Image (cartoon, grey):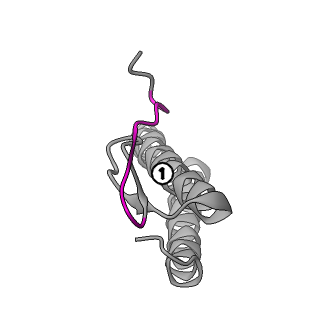
Amino acid sequence: MYGILKIVAEESNECVKTAILGSGGCYSGGIWGILGIAIDVLTVGIGAAAVIGVIISGIQYMTASGEPAAIAKAKNRLIQIAIGVLVYGTFYGLMRWLVPGWG
């Protein structure tokens, strides 16, 4: 019953309050509410993927044994993760500004 994507909605006068992955946000109805929920779920997924990627990159760096190619590969992965998080952060900020009644 308590799946990771369970939506519990409580209606109020101006918005629908949901508990999705613990966000507890307030979303307007219709397509904007669905878009807000989708972006919140995507944010959790991107964050989890970034943490897992950093852990993998760290393990890859520690097990490189001084090999320049392996060290470069680990550093490149870490740089790509940082760029991806920055790009998503920009997208998230833009969506918070564009989507009416979200946040």
Residue at the spot 43% in from the left edge and 62% down from the top edge: 15
* SS class, disc 1: helix
The image quadrant where one finds the N terminus is: top left
The image quadrant where one finds the C terminus is: bottom left
Q: Is residue 30 left or right of residue 22?
A: right
- Considering only vertical position in the picture, is 45 above or below 89? above
* Residue closer to the observer: 103 or 47: 103
Q: Please report the bounds of the magenta region as a residue range.
A: 4-14
Residue 62 is at least partly visible in this image: yes
Count of marks placed on residues: 1
* Residue closer to the observer: 33 or 53: 33
Give percent across and percent down for residue 20.
41, 42
Give percent across and percent down for residue 88.
56, 68
Kindly report the secondary structure that dominates the magenta region of the rendered protein.
loop
Residue matched to label 1:
50
Give percent across and percent down for residue 19.
36, 43
Q: Is residue 26 left or right of residue 37?
A: left
